[in-house]
Amino acid sequence: MEQPGRTQGVVEVPPPETRTGLALIVIMIGVLMAAVDTTIVVLALPELERALHVPLSGVVWVIISYLLVITLLATQVGRLGDMFGRVRMYETGFLVFIVGSALCALASNEATIIGFRILQGVGGALITANSGAVIADTFPPERRGRAYGFNAVGFNIGAILGILLGGVIITFISWRWIFWINVPAGVIAYALAIRVLHDRGERQRQRLDLAGMLLLGAGLFGVLWAMTRLATEAFTGEVAGLLVGGAALLVVFVLVERTRAAPMVALSLFRIPTVTPTLLASLFQSMANFAVLFLVIMYLQGVRELTPLHASLLLVPGYLVGGVVGPFSGRLADKVGPVWPATAGLTVEIVALAVYAQLGMTTPLWLVVAAAVVNGIGGGGFFPANTSAVMKAVPGPQFGVASGMLRTFANVGMVFSFAVAILVSARSIPRGLAFAIFVGTTHLSHELAGTFTTGLHAAFYASMGFMALAVILSATRVLHLRRSRVRPGPGTPHGGT
């Protein structure tokens, strides 16, 4: 039987060490750019509100629109990579991202900045959904964990640069340069990618599953749009209709895909023992952890009255430590398998959430930094190992769709996490005030600050529950590993552990 992760009848010749090193640098640059754009935009929200006369509800969509597009397109563009070349789609992502960034810099009102952020999100989807597959094509299974660890370094460095550069640009230059800066960086990255990266995986020549694309996109859009609407307005019949309709379309999508000869999402991947718990662990980790960024920033800006830049700087040590831990976790995953490093990382993140849940109105700020460092250690342990688990388990021709599915599950968790963060914060204070705190344009009175802080505790405890589910799902992969060891014969499935 053909081993998953290998292409039958094709002899894989690993590229030279120098070539793989250069390839990893190029991939890290792509992830770095995406991370820079995430944190740098958060710092620019107050200036965007003032310069473009964008209402508070519209400012939030500058973030949500980008995240929604990446979530909706991740599986589709990952599948396109399987069909037409993962490197080609990855490089195309740079071009789209460059154009989207330039247009964002030229935006003149609320509609244009959100519309151009959507275009930028298309480029981001092409980059992030195919980066994991490009690594899987470039590196042999026994070295992928280390490569994913360095990919995590790129994300953390990008997050730090976004905070530092964003502070300088917003303070001394203009908000438009947070987007212009992507143009030369993207051109350099694109030129390097053309020179260094080469498609090595087998391409699957088949027709696009347009019906599957439409059903999956519409279903995800309905559910995610409903959740984001809940973050900005009260529960209404329209929101309920979006939620139910989206869920119904996802059910129809699964039924239709089961009848397709070449489905958009290979449902057969879920029959690989470790894939389902790995994807679900990514979902619940994102639901638990992504809200932390918003909740902590809202605490620091609203309760402790810090500026957006000062609040973000307190999170830098966490990103820094996470970048250092990532390669070590990746190497450990290569040696002992990804289950234990990923599970340990999730457990450490629960500790960080427990520390955050103790924040009060007079908590020393060093404790916030300490929690960010602990969270960075946990995230640095989880991400490389969990990504390695998926890419080691799936067949080689499906690296692209598997990478896209992992990105989709993580991003769905992020969108839900954002909605939950806003909903919880809006329970104790007016929703408009919660938005203003997040954007960084106002602070809370002493009385409201105490009430708001108490509400944050409930949010952090809820995040601990989601993270505990991720720990359980991650740990169950040990059972799949033991079962695969007792199955004799060449047909034993590759568990990815």
Image: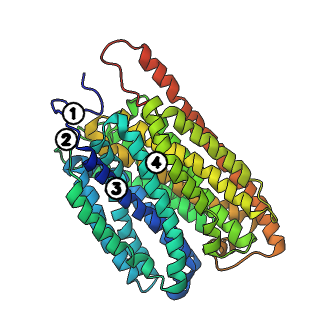
Q: Residue 476 at x, y = what percent?
A: 54, 29
Q: CB of mark 2 within 8 Å of CB of mark 1?
A: yes
Q: Is residue 227 visible?
A: yes
Query: Which sits in the foreground, 381 or 86?
Result: 381
Image quarter hosting the N terminus = top left
Q: Is residue 468 above or below residue 485?
A: below
In the rendered structure, find residue 202 and report the number of the disc placed on it: 2
Mark 3 and mark 4: span between their CA atoms? 26 Å
Q: Earlier in the sequence, mark 2 or mark 4?
A: 2
- Vertical relation: 472 (above or below) 489: below
Q: Residue at x 81, y 65 (%)?
A: 361
Residue 61 shows in the view: no
Above or below, 460 relative to 271: below
The kind of residue tagged 1 is Thr
Image spot of residue 14 (x, y percent): 23, 39
Mark nearer the viewer, 2 or 3: 3
Q: Earlier in the sequence, mark 3 or mark 4?
A: 3
Please report whichever mark, 4 or 1, sits nearer to the chain's N-terminal start.
1
Quick check: marks 2 and 4 in contact, CB under 8 Å? no
Q: Residues within 10 Å of mark 2 (few under 14, many from 20)?
A: many
Q: Which residue is mark 1?
A: 7
Asked if the residue at tag 1 contacts the one at tag 4, i.e. Cβ–Cβ closer than 8 Å, the answer is no
Give the residue number, with chain letter if any, for mark 4.
409
